[in-house]
Image (cartoon, rainbow, N blue to C red):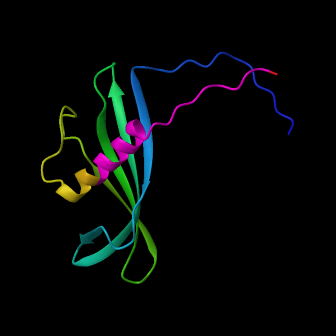
């Protein structure tokens, strides 16, 4: 592979975001909208840290199969209107998915060291 790169990347800390994907076992989470049930199979949780504040779950995007078998997507906002705390009324099962994502992001023991230059 022929590839080159230049520059010195810098992370912007004013609004750092991390997206964590979680594959869910089929049949373990069902979202209901307008009386129709959707079987969730994947969730992508977005965590954000604004101005070096503690990390907060901002939103979760679900991929699900609808009653007709077609794949659909849902986005659930997790922060309240003032963006300073959790949104009320979010079902407990959705917060459990957020907890799975947070746990997998920080507690699975993934470590990384850049390869030694050859």
Above or below, comparing residue 2 to residue 12 in the picture: below
Rendered view: 19 above or below 9: below
Q: Nearer the viewer, residue 23 or 45?
A: 23
Which residue is nearer to you in this view: 23 or 9?
Answer: 23
Quadrant assignment, res 102: top left
Q: Residue at x 29, y 22 (%)?
A: 53
Q: State the residue at coordinates (39%, 20%).
A: 14
Residue 78 lies in the magenta-colored region: no
* Residue located at (39% from left, 67% from top): 25
Magenta region, residue range: 97-117
Describe residue 22's horizontal placement relative to residue 86 as left or right. right
- Please identify the quadrant where the N terminus is shown: top right
Q: How many marks?
A: 0
- Residue 81: image quadrant is top left
x and y percentages locating residue 66 in the rendered image: 38, 77
Judge from the rendering whether residue 36 lies leftward or rightward of residue 85; answer left or right. Answer: right
């Amino acid at each position: 592979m022929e590839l080159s790169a230049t520059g010195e990347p810098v992370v912007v800390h004013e609004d750092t975001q991390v997206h964590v994907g979680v594959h869910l076992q089929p049949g373990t989470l069902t979202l209901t909208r307008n009386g129709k049930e959707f079987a969730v199979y994947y969730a992508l949780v977005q965590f954000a840290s604004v101005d070096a504040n503690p990390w907060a779950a901002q939103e979760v995007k679900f991929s699900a199969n609808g009653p007709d078998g077609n794949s659909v997507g849902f986005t659930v906002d997790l922060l309240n209107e003032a963006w300073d705390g959790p949104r009320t009324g979010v079902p407990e099962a959705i917060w459990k998915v957020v907890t799975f994502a947070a746990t997998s992001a920080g507690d699975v023991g993934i470590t990384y060291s850049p390869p030694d230059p050859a």
